[in-house]
Image (tube, coloured by chain):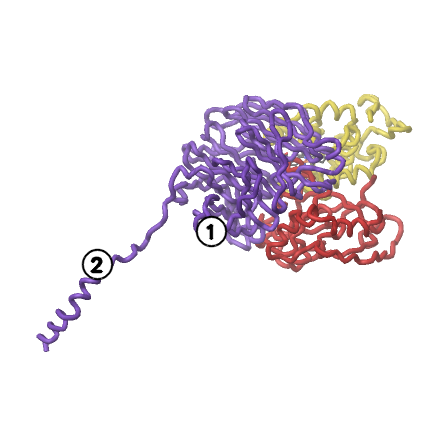
Chain colours: A red, B yellow, C purple
Amino acid sequence: MGWLDKVSERSTRGLARRSSRRSWLAGMGAALVGGGVIPVLPVARASSGGQPQASDIPDSGDPLSCDYWRHCAIDGFLCGCCGGTETSCPPGTEMSPITWIGTCRNPVDGKSYVISYNDCCGKTACGHCMCNRNEGDRPMYRPDKNNDINWCLGTKSTLYHCSTAIIIGLAVE
Amino acid sequence: MTFVGPSWRVCRAATVLLTGVLAVVAAGDPETPLMDTVRNVDKARVDYMLNCQGCHLPEGRGIPGVVPVMKDYVGNFLRVRGGREFLVQVPGSANAALDDAALADLLNWVLVTMSPEQLPAGWVPYTGTEVSKLRAVPLREVTRRRAALVEQM
Amino acid sequence: MRVMFLYFLMGIALPMRAALADFEPEPLGQVVTLPTPYPAGWLVVHDLAFNHMREGRFYLVDPDAGSLGGQMRGIMSGDFIASFVTSARRGEHYVIESFHDRGGRGGKRTDVVSIYDPATLSVLGEVIIPAKRLTGMPNRFAVALLGDDRFLAVYNFTPAQSVSIVDLQSRKFVGEIDIPGCAFVYPTGARSFSSLCSDGGLLITHLGAAGTAEGTDRLEPFNDVIDDAMFEKPAMIGGVAYFPTFTGNLVPVNLRGRIAEVGAKWSLTTARERAAGWRPGGAWPAVGGEDGRLYVLMHGHGAEGTHKDGGDQVWVFDAASGKRQQIIKLASWGIALSLSAGKPARLVVTGAEPTVDIYDAAGGHHVKTLAISASTPLLVHAVR
């Protein structure tokens, strides 16, 4: 099944998805995310060959949408909705060096990439684009695989603001 | 997967290359090329990212006082009695969702890429069998154990 | 002039003076005191206020009252995703919270155990603990009362893992105990606690009479942390923790003795239900009553990643036999389960809307949706 089918299936499948915590939290005044998915057609970027660069990765989807592929296990406010982007923190916040790292499958090239979900810290909660997806998430006794933890650790302040999803590598099978 | 490798002593005596299913273990001196010590460098690098880097940071940079700095340091543990065991028994290593051979490879990769200068001459890379035995005995107390080891350095 | 004024006073002002003397003004400065112990069935609803989490709240609620005014009995604050635990024995509530001294822009963090008087909901005292407590989605076992409620244990994550012990009698911080590779505090035996470890095993830490660590025990890995992980959120029935697993099994762990004992794992689902993807899930997927009934929040079409989705059904089991007794179809999608200590017992379902829904635990029918408006309610605690 193609990824487009999967995404649209997920968005129409009913309560199991629509009522997950992402919409539960998002419904409370924040912009609703993951409601109607408007898939952006895959745009393959030029690949330089050899060692893959993050900038070469064929990408598709809306980074402000909860359904964007690299958000497959994110939990929190999407930094793109807070003045930052999916890879950078909003002005005046500090990116947590400590985090957890998982993998998400890129629907365009079918490859799994290693995603680092660094939180941005030092300001009160962003409050926009709450998103919670849990593919590969494990309970809190497995901290290397858990998104329920406030990962604002090792930062000047532990105040949680928003979350990024940074591609740091290609997973080996 | 079981790993039947050369004993440490054989290792120390000469660089032994085991070709075949289960690749290569080499006597590590800091000069030994990475590939001779780590059987699958790409896998070790990604295993580090997925299992350790979240806390230990890229290149084992750590954060003093929060997560120990492994860069230019972790090799020192192989210079003190009990340090070799400690590196496997610390919960991040022992409890990792990796089989024994993969954990041995990862630890060797950590040592040679992050702290080559601190490794003692003729140090012996970890094997899956050794890791298997050590990780079965978890540490009860890390903070004090580490302090005692650091004191010896 | 003067006489006229006197007449005037006598004729008009005197009756007025009498009226003023009769008038009983409403007294100023009144503050409500609550009846303690509270009537059975009262609840504390944790609104973690996710969008502005420095201002979380704990609402003391009488679910039997009809209107908002009757339901809302008082509020405690809980800064930065606080934890709550209450001790009927000590007659105190505890809020474990974190303050940032520059508010919304951070600053120095101080972690505090705030000790509340249940009758006045005012703070009787506080104990400052190391600023290391786990902050994250609330978990009932991030804190625990141990040793006949003499000690409070708080789980720390920095990411080094440890537990802070507070002596509630002297209101003093006792010390910190390492629990390397393990998480949470599940009260065990008389004065011990268990923690779930990342290798799938269990660490049991024993406290001495003064609250310091006096040895540990370990259980070999029994939790399939990769393929069928146990939720870290068990239902407690009579000292046994019932841990649902991601794919729909149940692992009972007996915490009554000094050393925890793992019981036989059983399936919550039939092969057919499993094939249809029926799985437990949610922010708190299971609760249990002292009558032995185990309530599990279930969703269909489950798959990798659906374990926090919650569900639209609650399956009720006899915990001892594993027999399913009932299926409760929820009025609206549920995220977390709680159970009141009242008679009749109420099943409390935190809903996705967000709502806090009250069900009759025995019959399973929807009694009401609480009138309180919480922005992100999650866990609900039974209080006395």
Q: Amino acid at mark 2?
A: Asp
Q: In which quadrant will I find the N terminus of chain C?
A: bottom left
Residue C345 on image: x %, y %: 51, 36
Q: CA distance from mark 1 to mark 2?
A: 34 Å
Which comes before the other along the chain, label 1 or label 2?
2
Judging from the image, what secondary structure is the residue with disc 1 in? helix
Residue C147 in sight from this viewpoint: yes
Point 84% across, 58% down: residue: A43
**Amino acid type, mark 1:** Leu
Q: Nearer the viewer, residue A38 or A149?
A: A38
Q: Which residue is mark 1?
A: C68
Q: Nearer the viewer, residue C83 or C118?
A: C118
**Vertical arrangement, residue C31 with respect to residue A143, above or below:** below
Q: How many marks?
A: 2
- What residue is disc 2 on? C22
Residue C18, located in which quarter of the rendered image?
bottom left
Of B66 and C353, the residue lying toward us? C353
Q: Residue at x 63, y 36 (%)?
A: C327
Q: Is residue C153 left or right of residue C315?
A: left
- Mark 2 — on which chain does it sit? C
